Image (cartoon, rainbow, N blue to C red):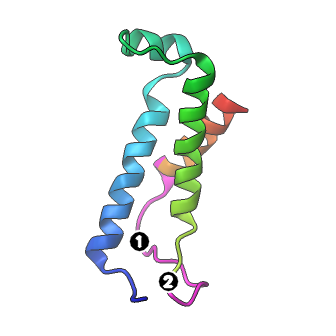
Amino acid sequence: MEELTSDEIAAIFSAAGDSVTVINADADFAAYQTANPSSSDTETQWKAMIQRNTEHLEIIKAYTKVDGTTSIWTSESFTAIDAAITTGKAIYS
């Protein structure tokens, strides 16, 4: 397996932003329902979606190079990601 290119790393970081958006979009289930009136999701399904996105962010933060130890991340800011993880855990816990 080869090391990820800088473009691949940038794409992964961008995908993390999508999960941040999902987690931060709605403060609670009522807000989710208001923002997504055609959704038939239950609160349990909504919390599961938040949990999947939160876990996705935790996995992305842990990505390493081929050596299995060195992080792929260099100068990326994880402030928004860390905040979304905290928010997400508060929602589904």
Magenta region's main secondary structure?
A: loop
Q: Is residue 59 left or right of residue 25?
A: right
Q: Is residue 35 above or below residue 68?
A: above
| Residue 67 within the segment the image draws in magenta | yes
Instruction: Specify the amino acid type for callout 1.
Output: Ser
Farthest residue, direction left = 7
Nearest the eye: 68 or 72? 68
Q: Is residue 31 above or below residue 51?
A: above
Q: Is residue 73 above or below residue 22?
A: below
Farthest residue, direction front = 40
**Residue at (35%, 71%) from the top-left corner?**
9
Q: Point out the stretch of residues depicted in magenta.
A: 66-80
**Which of the 4 quarters of the picture holds residue 43?**
top right
Q: What residue is disc 2 on?
A: 65
**Residue at (36%, 53%) from the top-left corner?**
15
Q: Is residue 26 left or right of residue 91?
A: left
Instruction: Specify the amino acid type for callout 2.
Output: Lys
> Whole-percent x and y of residue 60?
51, 62
Q: Which mark is residue 75?
A: 1
